[in-house]
Image: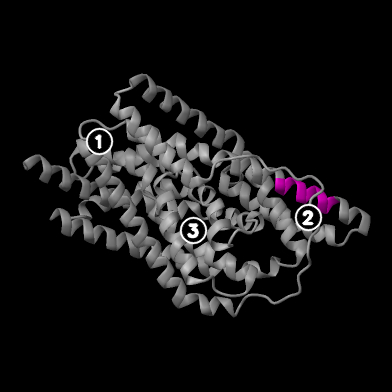
Amino acid sequence: MKSFFKTTAGRLLLSIIVGIGLGYAILAMPATLHDILTQVLLVTKQLTSQVILFIVPMIIIGCVAPSITSFSGNVTKVLGFTVGVAYLSSIGAASLAILTAVLVEPMITTQVSTAATTDLPEAIISLKFPTMDTMSALLLAIIIGLGVVWINGKKYADALQDFQKMVLLAVERIIIPILPLFVGANFALLVLSGKIANMAVFMPAFMFAIVCHLVWLALLYVIASLYSRRNGWEVVKHYGQAYITAVGTMSSAATLPVAIECMGKNKVVSPKTASFALPLFCNIHLCGAVISEIFFVITTYIMLYGHFPPVGHLAIFTVLACVIAIGSPGVPGGLNMSCAALVGTVILEGQDPATFFGIMTAVYTIVDGFGTACNVTGDGALALITDAFLERNESK
């Protein structure tokens, strides 16, 4: 149990428990102390959210551009195919999540508490760091990556690799440590505002998301088998260790060595393709993360506003989120952090996404391991497709 609370998921779970307990404790305090501690929580939430949102564009640039520069040969053709299959997989997974949510969310909506809520005061300290939006960061990353390839700029490619290491260290040493503060403050404020009773709505969403993960993996391997004319079971049957590892690490990148080891046991994907495809897909293929993101966006919206979000907004969000998924790193909660601004722009129609994003961060990161496990296992199917594609092109 002690080792569990040393993990990111364990710390976040502990921060939720502490945050809820602190919220109820503040409710029982005298008015003056209640107001002071409420302001402490508001400032903590505001500052930590700004730091996270400031680093997000650097995460996208630091992971996408170096991946592009690692190609050799016809980089445009290979990049186009691999990104294309990753995007189609994410779109398919998101569509499955929306279809399932449309069918099951009406049952969940009736369970949302209608308890009275309280408007919280504004934070006495308000800072907003200037930053780049996620779509601009993704486009810039692609342009930089392709530009370095076109000029054969090895020194720039090496610099991008170093930048990627710096960004991932920033995630590890800045974002991950402050996430518990951000999450704990959010849940304490949910108690103070009277919205905490609605949190029970997430439990069915967890279960439906995991079911969608498994269904999509089955469909993905069937498609891979039909396209490659090989037995996809020969790949997926070796992925048990990688799946379990991904649940624990919540990181596609951290699971990559285990995934490569598992892939090496099959007889239908060449080692050359596996060594190229798996490191690429661990950064750009996030089908399980997209499923979780869609479910929790919908459920958080229902929890806060009492009704299903507009389907048109969901459709736009899905298309853009799947683009961002291609640029999200294999770090805990990477997709959710990258979609923060998108939630405010598309789902909330320009409203401040801080509260919405705070709830999303808590529930998404805690169950991110299952989404990561779906991502990693799905990489095997896409590697099988890529191997067949490269083989057919070489034969031509």
Q: CA distance from mark 3 to mark 1?
A: 30 Å
Disc 1 packing (10 Å; few <14; some 14–19; many ≥20): some
Q: Is residue 186 shown left or right of residue 371?
A: right
Instruction: List the residue tagged with mark 1.
Output: 75
The residue where tag 2 is placed is: 22
Question: Residue shown at 66%/51% (left/top)?
Answer: 183
Give the numbered dot on residue 219: none
Within-10-Å neighbours for mark 2: few <14, some 14–19, many 20+? some
Q: In this view of the protein, can residue 264 be seen by the observer?
A: no
- Dot 3 and dot 1 residues touching (CB under 8 Å): no
Distance of label 2 from label 1 (alpha carbons)? 53 Å
* Chief secondary structure of the magenta portion: helix
Q: Is residue 100 magenta?
A: no
Determine the CA span between mark 2 and mark 3. 28 Å
Indicate which label's residue lies in the foreground, 3 or 1: 1
Q: Position of residue 372 (x, y in %)?
A: 43, 50
Q: Considering the image in quadrants, where does the C terminus appear?
A: top left
Looking at the rendered structure, the kind of residue marked 3 is Glu
Q: Amino acid at mark 2?
A: Leu
- Coordinates of residue 384 in the picture (x, y in percent): 21, 49
Q: Is residue 343 visible?
A: yes
Q: Identify the residue at horizontal 76%, vertical 70% (top origin).
A: 117
Give the magenta-colored segment's residue range: 37-46
2 vs 1, front mark: 1
Identify the mark nearer the N-term, 3 or 1: 1
Among the two numbered marks 2 and 1 on one chain, the one whose residue lies closer to the N terminus = 2
Residue that lies at the very extreme toward the left in this rendered image: 396
